[in-house]
Image (cartoon, grey):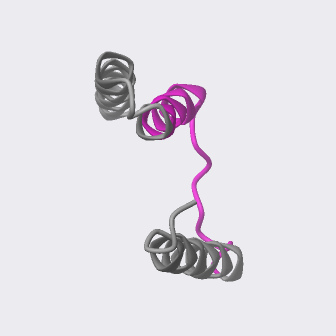
Amino acid sequence: MQLLQFPYILIGGLILAAILVIFFLNRKNIKRLTPLAASGFACIVAGIVFGDNIIVGYSLIGAGVVLAVTDIFVKAKK
């Protein structure tokens, strides 16, 4: 790991921890993720993680966006 990357990883981890704390403190009005939305979120995160391989990364991000938009349309029809 390069020394220059360490502050960015630390800041990212702190931001993620802050989001998790806020998430767990405001559990009253939380709507659960549907399986379709969770799959889209997982694809987007996997696309970011595998971003070194451009084809795989962008394909996973695109699939995640398509799944999220599909979930929005399904929820809108209900």
Q: Is residue 73 visible?
A: no
Task: Tell me the residue at 36%/32% (across/down).
Answer: 68
Task: Give percent across and percent down for residue 24.
Answer: 71, 75
43 relative to 71 in the view: left or right: right
Task: Give percent across and percent down for residue 28.
Answer: 66, 74
Task: Tell me the quarter of the image containing the N terminus.
Answer: bottom right
Q: Quadrant of residue 48?
A: top left
Q: Quadrant of residue 66?
A: top left
User: Is 25 contained in the magenta span?
Assistant: no
Task: Give percent across and percent down for residue 9.
Answer: 53, 70
Per the rendered image, the range of residues in magenta is 26-46
Figure check: 55 above or below 61: above
Figure check: 28 above or below 69: below
Task: Tell me the residue at 69%/83% (across/down).
Answer: 25
1 relative to 47 in the view: left or right: right
**Which is more toward the observer, 57 or 34?**
57
Figure check: 41 above or below 55: below
**Which is more toward the observer, 3 or 35?**
3
**Which is more toward the observer, 54 or 32?**
54
**Which is more toward the observer, 27 or 23?**
23
Task: Tell me the residue at 48%/38% (across/down).
Answer: 41
42 relative to 55 in the view: left or right: right
Task: Give percent across and percent down for residue 27.
Answer: 68, 72
User: Is 36 contained in the magenta span?
Assistant: yes
Task: Tell me the quarter of the image containing the C terminus.
Answer: top left
1 relative to 8 in the view: left or right: right
Task: Tell me the residue at 46%/68% (across/down).
Answer: 5
Q: How many marks?
A: 0
Q: Is residue 24 visible?
A: yes
